[in-house]
Image (cartoon, rainbow, N blue to C red):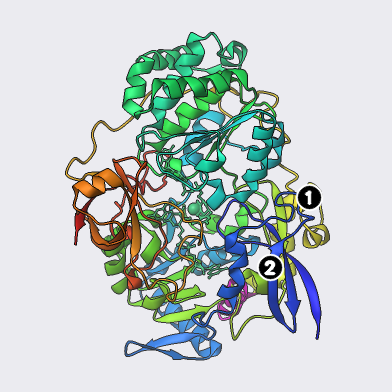
Amino acid sequence: MEENTVVTTCTRDCPNTCGLLAQVKDGKVIKLVGNKAHPINQGRSCIKCSHFIERVYHQERVLHPLKKINGQFEQISWEEALDEIAARMKTICREKSPEAILYYQGFGERSALKLINRRFFNLLGNTTITKGTICGGAGQGSQDLDFGNRISHDVRDYHNSQAMILWGRNPLATGVNLLPYMKDIKKKGGKVILIDPVNTETAPLCSMHVKPKPGTDSYLAMALSRLLHEAGAEDQEFLEKHCINYPEYKKLVYAHSVAEYAAMCDVKIEEIKEIADVLINQKPTALVLGWGLHRWEYAHTTMRAIDALGAVAGSIGVSGGGVSQGFEEYAPYDWSIWGDALQPPERRKFFMQLIGSELLAADPPIELAFVTAGNPVAMVPDANVTQKAFEKIPFLVVAGHFLDDTGIMADLFLPVTTFLEEKDIIASYGHDFIGPLNPAIPPVGECKSDFDIFMELGSRFDFADSYVKSVDQWLEIIMRPTLEKGGSLAEIFRLGINNPDAPEVPYRDKVFPTETGKFQLMTVFEQPAQWDRDYQFQLMSVAPREWICSEVTLESQTKLLEVKINTEKALALGLVDGKACVVENQFGRIRCIATFVPDQRPDLVVIYRGGWGQAGRNVNVLTRGLVTKVGNGTPYYETRVNVKKL
Ligand SMILES: Nc1nc2c(c(=O)[nH]1)N[C@H]1C(S)=C(S)[C@@H](COP(=O)(O)OP(=O)(O)OC[C@H]3O[C@@H](n4cnc5c(=O)[nH]c(N)nc54)[C@H](O)[C@@H]3O)O[C@H]1N2
Ligand SMILES: Nc1nc2c(c(=O)[nH]1)N[C@H]1C(S)=C(S)[C@@H](COP(=O)(O)OP(=O)(O)OC[C@H]3O[C@@H](n4cnc5c(=O)[nH]c(N)nc54)[C@H](O)[C@@H]3O)O[C@H]1N2
Ligand SMILES: [Mo]
């Protein structure tokens, strides 16, 4: 009986990036819990963590390389699998062009060694890669316009907040590390305000829940700014000394009355006044934005209006304040290792969020596609198009854990390790702490890490000499910028370190990395005029609490998807609570179980994202393939649907 505990970090696509302890007995992980010594999660962890062991040992997890022969998967050896990939790649490069090879890297894991994956494709030649993002993008692109380079406040700084506004964010489901700070603020007598059109799990934990009409938060932000100005509570010094465009911005604010704004975002004037009162009297107020907030075509208007509100309220550059969304998780690594500079910048890039239509229109066509850590067939909008495009790829390689909607389409499936089987380092998009992955167990079955796969594949090419190195050698290289500023690999592998580049309080000196050195207030208010009137409901395909993205199993997907709908609306449509219905639009249709919610907004329905099409549970058969106006993000919620009786 051998038992030991291993310090590691959750690598899943989540802002928490929790420090974990894996308890190992006889070579198996028997318990996975939050690490009390970790400065961010301090022993906490969420539902996703406790369920992760089930995933590691699940009967559906693929443990051997699989090749599709006559439509059936058959087990093959790693040698055969990698030889075949290398041979096919060489033939394509010789007879056609590296351009006919597509690399698609999803968001399943964003550790330091993942930079090596794309480096392989860059060494291979001018292969096709992706651009844009199905996650962040819009938020970052918009905030960069205001701050120059957006930097968020680390969660630990919320210890200094008197109040918090959670704007389109659902921390109970998606980011538990905010919860103690919310509790602490309320204990001090401050308010925690939630602004979210949907009734989320987080709502009961807040002092107040405001439910604007989806996609109209920019009006709410303008109304608040106007109220602050009318009360003479605007931060004159910051606005005049440290901002540009203040007169133009102020003109925008005064373009409508508070009552007009209130009508446009469908929030009661009394509620807007209550929020304004918090911004005026509970300083500093932290403005904490989520990712749901920016899944709109004109998300930049919302983001910039909220940034500007932060400036007016005196929250910027102030401890406990800030307008924060996310962090650049690749920042502590040496980005040049991606190797993009090895290829001309004008090389072909496909929009990730339009991967289906890009593939269908590709000229020259894609001959071989390689997907790692992503499930685009389920997670990219307009899934029927993605599905059709993936069916046409002559040779599809997928590296992953399960035969999800993308995995099942593979010609060659490569089984990869989970973070419990890997040595690596991971930074976070939710805080400033960099954590280690120490292998708790050897690879399950024949699984290999992406790193080992690419090293072994690389050894079959003429760039092997410069590319093939050990984990430690590559980590030394990738982490160099961070190690040069302080901290050692040994320290990282013990527990982790704070990113030495992270400021204690962003923009404390009120100097911004913009052209002018000042905070740039918005000067135009862009918002789409009309919505698709053929459909009754805005489709909110948000993050569920119980699982993350499409990390589910088939076994867990035997029931129909649930669609949450306002009770009165549902009754008027002749629906029955708990019974099947159809949700449809111009892109697709799915059968769902209707769940009536009495106080839900009548103009939206909620369906959790991440289900698989093979189980009839992919909400993305309904979502619109679109790119945000700023930041190349994905406006998933720019989708309208009707709900009908079966
Ligand atoms: N359990 C769990 N955790 C996760 C994930 C998961 O799937 N499950 N996903 C991970 C990933 S990939 C990400 S990016 C993060 C996302 O983390 P969050 O941003 O917290 O989660 P979302 O559900 O994407 O969006 C949050 C809220 O934004 C709201 N919202 C949408 N549109 C608007 C709007 O126009 N105005 C306002 N005010 N609110 C709006 C939605 O109703 C939703 O409740 O969470 C990560 N953590
Ligand atoms: N309708 C709708 N769709 C959405 C969203 C929405 O709000 N609404 N949100 C979007 C968002 S925010 C995101 S981030 C995307 C996520 O979409 P994807 O990037 O496709 O990510 P996941 O669904 O998490 O799938 C990741 C896969 O990688 C596997 N994996 C995990 N670690 C590794 C690894 O180290 N190596 C390899 N090779 N595989 C690994 C996992 O098991 C899983 O199968 O979905 C987007 N899709
Ligand atoms: Mo995401």
- Where residue 574 appears, x then y in whole percent? 19, 52
Task: Identify the amino acid type marked 2.
Answer: Leu
162 or 241, which lies in front?
162
- Where residue 629 appears, x then y in whole percent? 36, 39
- Residue at point 75%, 80% (across, down): 25
Q: Is residue 247 left or right of residue 266?
A: right
Within 10 Å of disc 2 (Cα), the crowding (few <14, some 14-19, many 20+) is many
Mark 2 and mark 1: span between their CA atoms?
A: 32 Å
Q: Was residue 457 drawn as part of the magenta stretch in this picture? A: yes
* Secondary element type, mark 1: helix
* Secondary element type, mark 2: strand
> What residue is shown with label 1?
484
In the image, residue 390 sits, relative to residue 236, either above or below, namely: below
- Where residue 289 appears, x then y in whole percent? 52, 38
Q: Quadrant of residue 305?
A: top left
Number of callouts in the render? 2
Q: Is residue 201 left or right of residue 382?
A: right
147 or 26, which lies in front?
26
Task: Identify the amino acid type marked 1.
Answer: Glu
Q: Is mark 2 within 8 Å of ligand 2?
A: no
Q: Was residue 309 drawn as part of the magenta stretch in this picture? A: no
Q: Which of the image's four quarters has the N terminus? A: bottom right
- Residue at point 70%, 24% (across, down): 509
Q: Which mark is residue 32?
A: 2
Visible in this render: residue 228?
yes
Q: Nearer the viewer, mark 2 or mark 1?
A: 2
What's drawn in magenta, residue-wise?
450-464
Visible in this render: residue 631?
no
- Where residue 422 appears, x then y in whole percent? 67, 72
- Residue at point 57%, 22% (across, down): 279
In the image, residue 607 sits, relative to residue 215, either above or below, namely: below
